[in-house]
Image: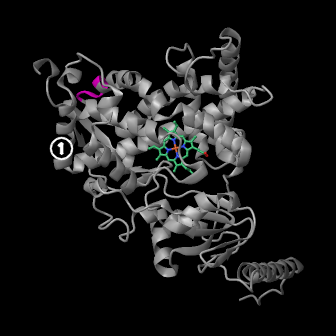
Amino acid sequence: MQPPSPPSAITLLSSFLFLLSLLWSFFLFFQWRQRCHHHHHHKLLPPGSMGWPYLGETLKLYTQSPNTFFSTRQKRYGIIFKTHILGCPSVMISRPEAARAVLVSQAHLFKPTYPPSKEIMIGPEALFFHQGDYHSMLKKLVQSTFLPSTIRGSVSEIEQIVLKFLPTWDNTTINTLEQMKRFAFEVAMLSAFGGGWDIDKERIKHLYQCLEKGYNSMPFNLPGTPFHSAMKARTLLNETLIRVIQNRRESNGEDQGGGLLGVLLRHKDDNLNHLTDSQVADNIIGVIFAAHDTTASVLTWILKYLHDHGHLLDAVTKEQEGIGREILEGKRGLTWEDTRRMPLTSRVIQETLRTSSIVSFTFREAVEEVELEGYIIPKGWKVLPLFRTIHHSPDFFPHPQKFDPSRFEVPPRPNTYMPFGNGVHSCPGSELAKLEILVLLHHLTPTYRWKVVGDDEGIQYCPFPVPKRGLPISVTARINKTKL
Ligand code: HEM
């Protein structure tokens, strides 16, 4: 047996370097802990754990489901706790009054914040990313496009889209989420551009799909990555939209056409300046983005809940049949007034929004040191109102796991129900979303039945929570319309 050889200079050097890096890591770790715990030693940070240096609790957030992540911490620390996710010290809150403070009464102290990659992808001039005058000017324009008094004129166009889609599902197996995305995209395009415009819809749709694939991927802008393809699609989408914008500006004089695009193009500020082409394009892209995945995910959940609760499906069907036989016979179209006479169906939508809470939380950032619930939130920390946790609290919604639309026969306690957010950045599209769901259910429930294919219970994030595999269903005709 050979005697062990003496350690070489290289081995010694690498051991030394290893020790040094270990010491350095300890030093950084303690410094970081110090900063987290004692930065505001005279005032209290919320309770909670900041996890590992740099990584924080990000891995835990991604390895558990977000719901488990929130609920275990809420049980351990209470309705406000600190954590460290996605590289940022963060505070999560699940007390309705605290969420209201962040989103409404002290909204000026909390600005919206998104990862830079998302901002580039949607367009930096879109309203989501702004506060103050620019945001409120745009918000008024977007809101005016989606007010009930404006969208009531779109009922028959939305109905036409529904009637185009439904027969293609007959006697086939469909992926609910995919189909609902296609449907909600058509409605979003209608609201963005107005009806009757000769725009290259297929091209815009294709570019959007590329954009979406990269939107939720790792933001590495290297050739071959989905992020890179998405960035290329974003450039092409921008070029296409700028062409549409310029055509409308040139050919239409004062009119400028319908939809959000028309509203944005007609706007002039006090000095009679118009919005720039890129301000218009970023906001059109942003609104289509905000409008279709959200609505499609909610529609997918509705089909799942109605499938699982046969008595509710029967009751909704009855309500829809009661709206008017002539509509189902194709003798007249659905009207805005008809859609106001669907109380049970509306409660099913409300309960679906609560149970599925597809926008589980939102992000804000403290613009200065703020006191909240007796704790200090340092400047630059992220603050996350947890909508889902509030929606699933037994204090506000007894037996929260139960799908029970009747709970909305009385209005929920103020600030406990926020599927569309709250305050300055709340959703301007809530009425449109509800309207398109009502129109679809009006034609779907009396005419078709569906069965979930496979027994995959569970949730998948794409990026909103949706039933596993997008809920494959087989659809069959319920009655033969000609025999009505
Ligand atoms: C069921 C479907 C929908 C849900 C659940 C939903 C939910 C939300 C929520 C929670 C917010 C607030 C986010 C925050 O505070 O950070 C929001 C904002 C927004 N939503 Fe929706 N939304 C839906 C459909 C739509 C539709 C159909 C449109 C467009 C017509 C739309 C356009 C927007 C826009 C533009 C914002 C940003 C508002 C701002 O920053 O001021 N959404 N949405």
* Label 1: which secondary element: helix
Residue in the picture at 26% in, 51% down: 455
The x, y position of residue 192, in whole percent, is 55, 27
**Residue under pointer 1:** 315
Q: Tell how many labels.
A: 1
Name the side, left or right, on which 349 lies relative to 229: left
Q: Is residue 337 above or below residue 71?
A: above
Residue in the picture at 45% in, 68% down: 68
Q: Quadrant of residue 413?
A: bottom left
User: Where's the N terminus, which quadrant?
Assistant: bottom right
Is 168 magenta? The answer is yes
Relative depth, front residue between 145 and 9? 145
Q: Quadrant of residue 32?
A: bottom right
User: Where's the C terminus, which quadrant?
Assistant: top left
Q: Is residue 281 above or below residue 104?
A: above
Relative depth, front residue between 79 and 85? 79
Q: Amino acid at mark 1?
A: Ala
The x, y position of residue 206, in whole percent, is 55, 27
Q: How is the image coloured?
A: one colour
**Region of the chain picked out in magenta, as a range:** 167-171
